[in-house]
Image (spheres, rainbow, N blue to C red):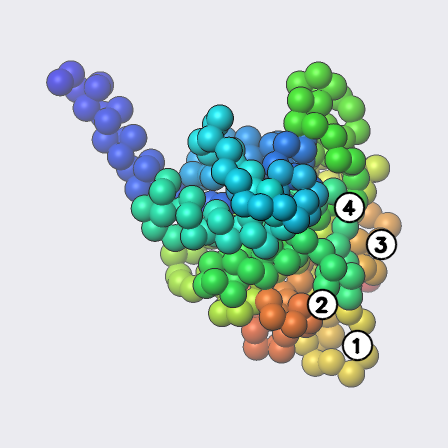
Amino acid sequence: MHTWTRLVAVLSVVTAINAQNLILTNDDGWAVAQIRAQNDALNAAGFNVVLSAPAENESGQDLRFNASDTRLNYVNSFPVDAVRFGIQTLAPEFFGSAPDFVVSGPNVGNNLGSGVTGSGTVGAACEAALEGIPSTAFSGDTASQVSYTTLDSSPNSQSSLAARLYSTLTVTFVQTLLASSARPVLPPGVTLNVNYPSTSGCSAAADYSWVFTRLTPNSSAVDVETCGSDHLPDETSVVDRSGCFASVTVINATTKTDVDAATQGAVLARLTGLVTCLPS
């Protein structure tokens, strides 16, 4: 074997060893532009991705596996069923083990505050957490439920640009969260809820800042101390604020409510260097 061939073989093995295995899901459907742009971005970043999402938005029908492209799979059922199928069936098949992480979304439209209780995107991330797999739900204010073919046929449309921008931001977040080899990635029984503001006026990934938040306003709550305060801003006020601020909230995967300060702190420590303070 030539030296160059041996080197390529070694690098391929190292890449395969270091690649982190992700299940990608959502509740808008496996063929929407948002999830396909996210799939492309995660693969381009070096992650080992298998998509397992509903055929359509919460169709509520029987399970069904599509193998036309073996890494792009749909389930004719709810988001929770789709992510469960990804974790329990597809991950052992493709990874030979449980996935390292579950990315849910980005959803078309934000999932904020008490409204997360009705979100399939958040529900899928919660299901992953309850099965012991670290996860995050991502949602963005801009775009609509259009076909993934729009990414090529109308690359400069608002939906295509937003899908690619949110996908870039999600890759940055996942890379930061998984950068440390320390385990567990997240405390047991929690997931993260990330929301991106409108892309209007925020057209580049560099425009965005990440802010650590709580789910709902609570003037009596004592949160993790950061930015000179032990009271976190609520995610709705951050996303709706003038500027380009993405919210990052730790929620209980069972109750879909805020968690205590110690649990918030464990997550915040993994995001050092990413999250920032709101301007005064």
Q: Nearer the viewer, mark 3 or mark 1?
A: 1
- For label 2, the SS is loop
Between marks 3 and 1, how big is the CA–CA gap? 18 Å
Per the image, the residue denoted by label 1 is 218
The amino acid beneath tag 3 is: Arg
The image shows residue 82 at horizontal and vertical percentages of: 55, 48
- For label 1, the SS is loop
Q: Which residue is located at x 78 percent, y 36 percent?
A: 144
Asked if residue 158 lies left or right of residue 222, the reply is right
Could one spot residue 24 in this view of the protein?
Answer: no
Label located before the other in sequence (4 or 3)? 4
Label located before the other in sequence (4 or 1)? 4
244 w.r.t. 231: above or below: above
Per the image, the residue denoted by label 4 is 109
Q: Nearer the viewer, mark 4 or mark 1?
A: 4
The amino acid beneath tag 2 is: Arg
Between marks 2 and 3, how big is the CA–CA gap? 15 Å
Per the image, the residue denoted by label 3 is 241
Between marks 2 and 1, how big is the CA–CA gap? 9 Å
Question: Depth check: 45 or 147 in front?
Answer: 147
Could one spot residue 261 in this view of the protein?
Answer: yes
Label located before the other in sequence (4 or 2)? 4
Q: Which residue is located at x 75 percent, y 35 percent?
A: 145
